[in-house]
Amino acid sequence: MRFYITILLLACVACSDSKPTNRLPEDQMADILADIHLDEGKISALNIVSVDTSVILYNQLERATLKRHGVDSTRFAKSFAEYVQEPQDFIDLYKRVNAALAKKQQMKK
């Protein structure tokens, strides 16, 4: 009987935190998100009246950013969704995004 209980407990422990993750590393994800937010800022600065035009331009800039980072849109979207599901990881990610944006701003000066 102890043997079965031990096996059951080991199975529960082994299955609990062993979710395989295929998300992008935090530093790479932060760089991509920083670039995407800069792209959004560029579009906002253009003061485009048509929402459709803004969306089309945003999609083109996002594709170019992802291509520059060597990531396809599906992997990026899945990684983002995984970060969102873990609140502390998401907070840590955006701390890196803010740091990356601050660094890019300092480089401009």
Image: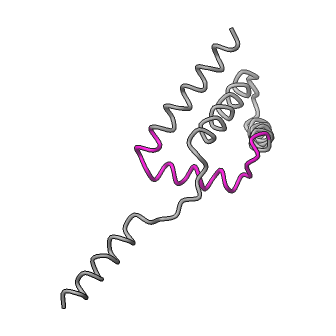
Majority secondary structure of the magenta segment?
Answer: helix
Residue occupying the point 49% across, 31% down: 95
- Residue farthest along the bottom direction in this orientation: 1
Q: Is residue 81 left or right of residue 106?
A: left
Quarter of the image that includes the C terminus: top right
Q: Is residue 86 above or below residue 93?
A: below
Residue occupying the point 55% across, 53% down: 81
Q: Is residue 26 above or below residue 85?
A: above
Q: Quadrant of residue 108?
A: top right
Image location of residue 44, percent across then percent down: 69, 26
Question: Is residue 33 covered in magenta?
Answer: no
Image location of residue 56, percent across then percent down: 79, 41
- Residue farthest along the front direction in this orientation: 3
Q: Is residue 70 above or below residue 30?
A: below
Q: How is the image coloured?
A: one colour
Residue occupying the point 73% across, 28% down: 43
Q: Is residue 83 above or below residue 43?
A: below
Query: How many discs mark residues in the rendered view?
Result: 0
Residue occupying the point 43% across, 50% down: 86
Q: Which residues are magenta?
A: 68-91
Camera-side residue of 62 and 24: 24
